[in-house]
Amino acid sequence: MLTHMGETPNRPAAPGISDLEVKDGQIIFDSVWSSLERELGREKLAFPREIFWLNGAPGAGKGTNTAFILQYRDYGADPIVVSDLLSSPEAKKRIDAGMLVGDREVVEILFRKLLEPQYISGAIVDGFPRSMVQVECLKHLFTKLNDLRTEFRGSVEGIRFPKPHFHILVLFVDENESVRRQLKRGQEALAQNEKAQRDGGPLAEVRKTDLTPEAARNRYRVFKERTYEPLQSLRDIFHYHFINAQGSLSEVQARIIKELQYQSSLELSEETYDLISPIPLASQIVEHARQDLVRRLDDYADRNAETFRQVIDLIQGKFLPIIRAHAISGQAHVNIETTVFDDTLAISMFIDIFSERGFHAVVDQHRIEIPETIVAGTGKVITRVKKVWRVSIRFSGSEIRRGGA
């Protein structure tokens, strides 16, 4: 097990959790959060109001541009470089090989660092998230911080829990440029160390991946395969800044300024956010939709078995033949008169069953007045109401190619 910087060796980790074995973001986050809450107290878990999560291809200039972003955003604390937080021999060995360290270790070390008071107004985190598990932990952190804001709003502690702002900042260069920059960095580090040994002075860090084209190229590919794709999943959730980092330093910094100025104009005020925050994000609804669907279906079968069976019989007897006849087009429209749908629960069952089977069903009621008799002497028309259920069902159809089409 990797050790944690800033922790006493005797402090036990969360029971039953191994950072190198568990690859479930929810389990890892819950374990780390519970550990922090037990040790520090819930009211002390005040994270920075704004966090830039900085990532980029090897050689893209993260270190070079971090100081510029700090100055532009007027943060007082140094950036948090995740690789610098990992100092154990095991972690260093994995880093030298271009590999990732255990997700739980990274998450806990980082969260503890972010809770230090100098980061309260804002922080830049260099090198997180770098895996899909870490991405999931980041999503859970954002949700938890919003929950804390709601919990403490109006209390004495409320000022310490503002609306969180997460920015994903990705610096990108292509593979050839990345390899060229890595090798140049390695040559410069070796030259500096030779001079330091001869004349004295500080030694530069020499990364093994900066010494050969093969190692540099492999490190780039690890980034593309394991980090870049997970970062893309955050586009629809947080402010996402994708920066072309090829070109001169001044050109890249001009792009960063332009991007951050544009995104700043999109941030909601605290008051506006408070008004719309009770409406969940689409991603949050979708995340639990499948579990909720299964729960509802099981509940139908257990508590409303007779109605459930009626709906299933209706689908098998009336709808499936029409759906099969429209298998090529992928959509079927059915008008039906049935007393089954008089029960609104039956409509919910109908839609849920089709959803579970991979269909999308919409049910709409139309009321049609049918004239039956005319009252003698008055000429008044007596009508009866006919209820027609219009059902639209969509699914993935089968495309048939004919001739040379």
Image: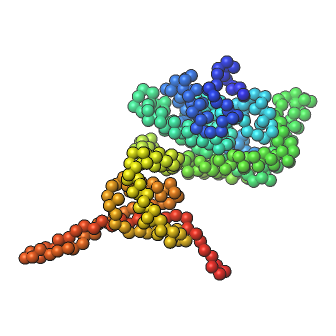
Q: Residue at x 47, y 65 (%)?
A: 320
Rendered view: 62 above or below 201 = below
Q: Position of residue 353 (x, y in %)?
A: 46, 55
- The answer to whether residue 125 is above or below residue 251 is above
The image shows residue 156 at horizontal and vertical percentages of 42, 26
Q: Residue at x 44, y 61 (%)?
A: 315
Between residue 247 and residue 123, name the one nearer to us: 123
Total labels: the figure holds 0
Residue 269 in the figure: left or right of residue 61 = left
The residue at the point 58 percent across, 29 percent down is 115
- Quarter of the image where the C terminus is located: bottom right
| Residue sitting at x 54%, y 26% | 37
Q: Nearer the viewer, residue 364 or 265?
A: 364
Report whether residue 358 is seen. Answer: yes
Residue 267 visible somewhere in the drawing = no
Query: Where does the image place residue 61, in percent across and percent down from the top left?
Result: 73, 44
Q: How is the image coloured?
A: rainbow
| Quarter holding residue 120 | top right
Question: Along the line of sight, which residue is nearer the eye, 46 or 193?
Answer: 46
Residue 75: x percent and y percent? 60, 35
Image quarter (top left, top right, bottom left or bottom right) of the N terminus = top right
Q: Nearer the viewer, residue 226 or 31?
A: 31
Furthest residue to the left?
Answer: 377
Q: Is residue 385 left or right of residue 189?
A: left
Q: Residue furthest right?
A: 198
Q: Viewed as shown, does residue 135 lie left or right of 317?
A: right
